[in-house]
Amino acid sequence: GRSPVVLGIESSCDETGAGLVQDGVLLGHAVASSMDEHARFGGVVPEIAARAHVHAAAPVVRAALAEAGLEMADIGAVAVTTGPGLSGALQVGVAAAKGFAYSLGVPLYGVHHLAGHVAADTLEHGPLPDPCMVLIVSGGHTSLLLVRDLARDPIVHLGDTLDDAAGECFDKVARVFGLPYPGGPAVDRAARTGDPRAVAFPRPLTGPRDDKYAFSFSGLKTAAARWAEQHRASGRPLPVEDGAASLQEAVADVLTKKAVAACRDHGVDTLVVVGGVAANSRVREMAQQRCDAAGITLRVPPLRLCTDNGAMIAAVGDLLVRAGAEPAPLDVSIDPSAPL
Ligand code: KG4
Ligand code: ZN
């Protein structure tokens, strides 16, 4: 028989997402974003994000059901992000999920946000091989993970950023360059007409004595700010496109070099790149080139599943249901600083 339809709810940051997944198949999903409301503050304002989730939670579920051609009564399980994320934002999603699970009389599953990002790819490319290497790059995370069975085995954390996340670096440098928020997509767009060799930005932690799986992006941010400052001081107009292309080149170089090395070191032949920064065109391109050269299969979820969404949470819920995992109690708490 078929397993139950899982409703997934995501509200850890500024996106309210609802998705419906059954047996690894995405049936429908919808995302509402409060991104525009944060734009003038240059970053996500937790209180505004939480209020926006209150507003959007029920409508995104309704929209996901409509897209799937399903009704509320068709939902057989509910999965929700319990962390990591902004606590007020998480609370709204978890409270909504509990309401749905309790009123429908179906089990509730708590999901780790990063497991969601990893599982997003299964909705497009099918089950993940065991083992696989995952590079997760978003506004809050830059990590290399060794993943076995998502529903059963703990994820092995190989390395992390020591300071800023890659997405944060894009967002902050974009601000210095005078590009709109969120910075990542703006840098990507500006880079299209820029020269990636124009500025020799540093490649942090890529030396022979550096931690192989650790990342650092704050120095890159500082270097980009200094470059912009020097240009402005000289009275010349800032070649934003060249700066954006060069920054993107440095970030992509570091990310893909370390990810491919991690695959080689661990004898893993599949690399999955997930998270908001996986949407970056140069990161995708360079990852493909380096994986091809190393005989590694690269998997990157489609753009719409790279950024925060409810489908990825439903995908994990679906794996948990099918693995016979224990549901969460209805008094389950949020875990804003959840470790992996
Ligand atoms: O995964 P995500 O939606 O949210 C979390 O951080 O969990 O990732 C958002 C991050 C932001 O920093 C955004 O600037 C970045 O992903 N991003 C990009 C691109 N699209 C989104 N960075 C570089 N290039 C892009 N095309
Ligand atoms: Zn995310």
Image (tube, rainbow, N blue to C red):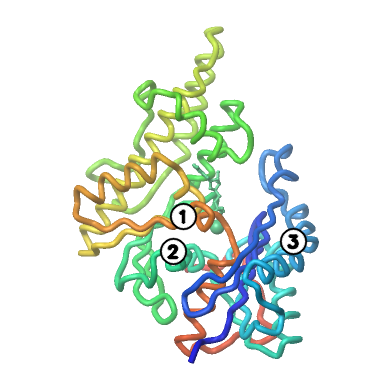
- Where is residue 152, by image quadrant? bottom left
Vertical arrangement, residue 157 with respect to residue 320, above or below: above
Label 1 residue SS: loop
> Do we see residue 159 in this rendering?
no
**Label 1 neighbour load within 10 Å: few <14, some 14-19, many 20+:** some
Name the residue type under label 3.
His
Ligand 2 located in image quadrant: bottom right
Mark 2 and mark 1: Cα distance apart in space: 7 Å
Identified at 37% across, 61% down, the residue is 134
Q: Is residue 215 left or right of residue 326?
A: left
Residue topped by disc 2: 124
Residue topped by disc 3: 53
**Label 2 neighbour load within 10 Å: few <14, some 14-19, many 20+:** some
Mark 3 and mark 1: Cα distance apart in space: 24 Å
Dot 2 or dot 1: first in sequence order is 2
Identified at 36% across, 51% down, the residue is 214
